Amino acid sequence: MKNKIEIPAIHDKNLMKILTDLGLLDKINNMQLMCSNCGETITLENIAGIKILKNDVVVICDNPECIFQESNEMINGE
């Protein structure tokens, strides 16, 4: 049986506020935020995940490999 993980979701209408609150919106608008897995520039169109790790904000893009890698890390507790 596969492990189940809870994945919190952000509605599009709340995304801008959350990005602003986390100090990420300006970085995205200035193309200064990169995917933590592949290094792709994060945009409003390709952002797929945000998490806090040791007081740092980590963002991933919508590349299926990045999503898969992040999902595996969540399942394995990394």
Image (cartoon, grey):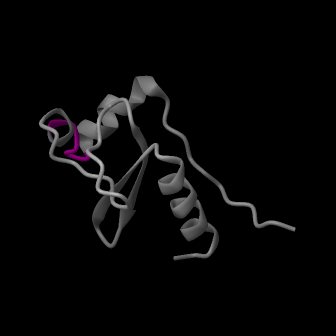
Q: Residue at x 51, y 76 (%)?
A: 78
Q: Would you identify the image quadrant in which residue 57 lies?
A: bottom left
Residue 50 on image: x %, y %: 40, 51
Start-end of magenta stretch? 22-26
Q: Is residue 23 magenta?
A: yes
Q: Main secondary structure of the magenta part?
A: loop
Q: How many marks?
A: 0
Residue 52 as seen in the image, left or right of residue 22? right
Closer to us: 30 or 66: 66
Coordinates of residue 15 in the picture (x, y in percent): 38, 32
Residue 31: where, in percent of width, then height? 16, 39
Q: Residue at x 26, y 52 (%)?
A: 34
Residue most extreme to the top? 13
Residue at image location 32% in from the left, 53% down from the top? 35
Q: Is residue 75 above or below residue 24?
A: below
**Res 6 → quadrant:** bottom right
Asked if residue 26 is positioned above or below residue 32 in the image, the reply reads: above
Task: Say whether residue 44 is left or right of residue 13.
Answer: left
Residue 30 among magenta residues: no
Which of these two is toward me, 75 or 64? 64
Residue 54 in the image: state x and y as whole percent.
33, 73
